[in-house]
Amino acid sequence: MFLWGTATAAYQIEGAVAADGRGVSIWDTFSHEPGRTRDGHTGDLACDHYHRWREDVALMSGLGVNAYRFSIAWPRVQPLGTGTANPKGLDFYERLVDALLEAGIQPVPTLFHWDLPQALQDRGGWMNREISEIFADYAAIVASRLADRIPLWITLNEPFVHMAYGYAMGIHAPGQALLTGALPAGHHQLLAHGMAVRALRAAGARQVAITNNCTPVWPASQQEPDLSAAHAYDVLHNRLFNDPVLLGKYPDLSAYTPTLDFVHDGDLDVIAAPLDFLGVNYYNPTRIAAPTSEGLPFTDAGITGYPTTAFGWPVVPDGLRELLTGLETRYGAALPPVLITENGCSTDDTATLDDGPRIAFLEGHIAAMRQAMAEGVDVRGYFVWSLLDNFEWAEGYHQRFGLVHVDFETQRRTPKASYAWLRSFLEAQKTDT
Ligand code: BGC
Ligand code: BGC
């Protein structure tokens, strides 16, 4: 069965940050620091999904999806990131999972979507190698409660974006700006992934995946300096996270670091544990030129000549076909079946419910995915980001990615035109097969 779903993440929708013993996450800390998010927005209330999840499951059921990708908030399960589980945290996800199953929707949990318990950040966060093993313990705790009902598990969401935005540039929590010094935070996430794969399987999970953010990289010209800059960027964004997982080795990182001393013997064997799926999040291609200053070996040259989302991101549906066929060419037999675990676009906060651009976006990207499938890529699912307008990280509530509009004053949910479009689309899939 092809999975058609919607995707969300805990900190972006749940709210209820102090309910039932939840601990503090790095996003609570970060969003409360002055100047970190647009207009000082925080996820304190978000979509109040923690209390309104029944309504949200009903919205998905009305939409006709057969899968739902959500994330589990580590600080709800282990408030300090280690030690005995907080039963109330697990109870919340168990109720959600049971309601989804009842509605015929396959739950697809992600164990880490950036909301690290603050207590673990106080020990260095992902810069500290010990966090990898601690993550595997958390994975085991969650799976031992839920793996009897959940076949498919995702370990991490976008370790690239978490490393780059959180540790290299300081735009996201934990707000560190270590530049290339952030590479260990990438490696330790990958190690955590590998250790969690083992822990999940031992606890009865049948299928395991990781979700990577991938982007086709376009050189700004065919001149040598631009071509090598584009190669360097592709290494950092895509290959740094796909190669170890799928091939058991790192690409050549000499443009970024003189030493890989944070990689220990045996780590790559752990990281390359066989996977059932590769989760791919796609938003846009990236156009790269030679560096204009000292520092990183590339510059983002920007893409013009395409429509843009409210975020200003270029809308390039064919980039998804290019990305998928590129993965197939690069990894061949080492590429497991792919799930598109996120794809979608924002409309700005003054937009109406009449979100024509989102319909065009989804139509175009689904067609591009199908083109890649016709060209031989084994894609098994597609998840729209996102079900609800939600807390868009550093952008606060200003970028609305939902199929369903949320009035953040009243928490009223109103399906947009794209919701109705997707419902008819999914209905037609049923009669086609
Ligand atoms: C990426 C998104 C990411 C965002 C961070 C984009 O370029 O494609 O996946 O969340 O940057 O704001
Ligand atoms: C992230 C989401 C985010 C989306 C849009 C992805 O990088 O996984 O959490 O909301 O992009 O920026």
Image (spheres, rainbow, N blue to C red):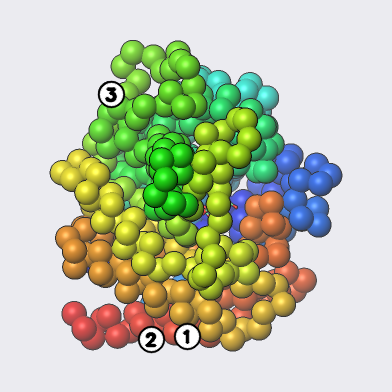
Q: Is residue 295 above or below residue 97?
A: above
Q: Which residue is mark 3?
A: 269
Q: Amino acid at mark 1?
A: Ala
Q: In the image, which is nearer the foreground, mark 3 or mark 2?
A: 3
Tell me if 242 is positioned left or right of 393 in this view.
left
Q: Is residue 62 above or below residue 272?
A: below
Q: Which residue is mark 2?
A: 424
Q: Amino acid at mark 3?
A: Asp
Q: Are marks 1 and 2 in contact (CB under 8 Å)?
A: yes
Q: Quadrant of the N terminus?
A: bottom left
Q: Which residue is mark 1?
A: 420
The disc, 3 or 2, on the residue closer to the chain's N-terminal end is 3
Q: Quadrant of the C terminus?
A: bottom left
Tell me if 96 is positioned left or right of 370 in this view.
right
Mark 1: give few (<14), some (14-19) or many (20+) Cα within 10 Å.
some
Q: Are marks 3 and 2 in contact (CB under 8 Å)?
A: no
> How far, Cα to Cα, is label 1 from label 2?
6 Å
